């Protein structure tokens, strides 16, 4: 699975949320100033070429839908984050999050419970 650029990921997030959409639908969700239709269309074609999307044609209108699940891309992104910024250590990632996000004891306890359940 290929990595997405920031713009591609922004468009892909919208498509995952909408599930099935046209370029016009995507533009409606984007903030101001809205990029031109041709720009969004180009990004969508790139996403399709990268294997993230497919489409169904209705005359000249294309309806796009994801063929890569958001969870699958999330999993890859987290693995890359851990590898590239935390020397492959999930422990370092969690330590970083605990320090940076000022997690409350209750939140840490919930994380520990989840880890405990996973081990069983």
Image (spheres, rainbow, N blue to C red):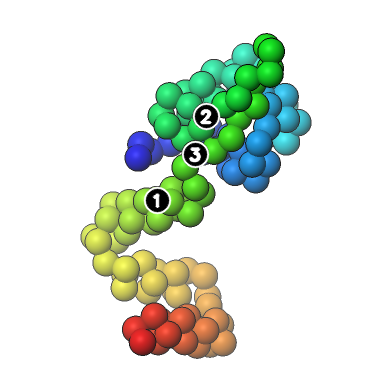
Vertical placement of 74 versus 14: above or below? below
Question: Is 109 on the left-hand or right-hand side of 115?
Answer: right
Whole-angstrom CA distance, mark 1 to mark 3, is 17 Å
The circle on residue 63 is: none
Of labels 1 and 2, earlier in sequence is: 2
Question: Is 67 on the left-hand or right-hand side of 93?
Answer: right
Q: Quadrant of residue 40?
A: top right
Q: Secondary structure at mark 3?
A: loop
Residue most extreme to the left: 87
In contact (CB < 8 Å): disc 3 and disc 2: yes
For the residue pair 79 and 84, the one nearer the viewer reads as 79
* Residue for badge 3: 67
Q: Residue at x 48, y 54 (%)?
A: 71
**Count of numbered labels shown in the rendering:** 3
> Which quadrant is home to the N terminus?
top left
Whole-angstrom CA distance, mark 1 to mark 2, is 21 Å
* Residue for badge 2: 54
- Across and down, in percent, residue 116 comes to 40, 87
Q: Residues within 10 Å of mark 3 (few under 14, many from 20)?
A: some
- Front label number (1 vs 2): 2
Vertical placement of 36 versus 8: above or below? above
- Across and down, in percent, residue 78 comes to 39, 56
Q: Residue at x 48, y 27 (%)?
A: 48
- Across and down, in percent, residue 94 comes to 39, 72
* Residue for badge 1: 77
Vertical placement of 90 versus 81: above or below? below
> Which quadrant is home to the C terminus?
bottom left
For the residue pair 22 and 35, the one nearer the viewer reads as 22
Q: Residue at x 44, y 48 (%)?
A: 73
């Amino acid at each position: 699975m290929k990595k997405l650029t920031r713009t591609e990921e922004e468009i892909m997030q919208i498509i995952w949320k909408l599930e099935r959409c046209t370029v016009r639908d995507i533009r409606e969700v984007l903030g101001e100033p809205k990029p031109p239709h041709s720009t969004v269309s180009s990004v969508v074609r790139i996403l399709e070429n990268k294997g993230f999307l497919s489409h169904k044609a209705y005359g000249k209108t294309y309806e796009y839908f994801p063929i890569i699940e958001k969870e699958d891309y999330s999993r890859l992104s987290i693995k890359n984050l851990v590898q590239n910024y935390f020397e492959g250590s999930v422990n370092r990632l969690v330590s970083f999050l605990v320090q940076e996000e000022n997690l409350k004891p209750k939140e840490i306890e919930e994380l520990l419970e989840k880890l405990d359940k996973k081990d069983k």
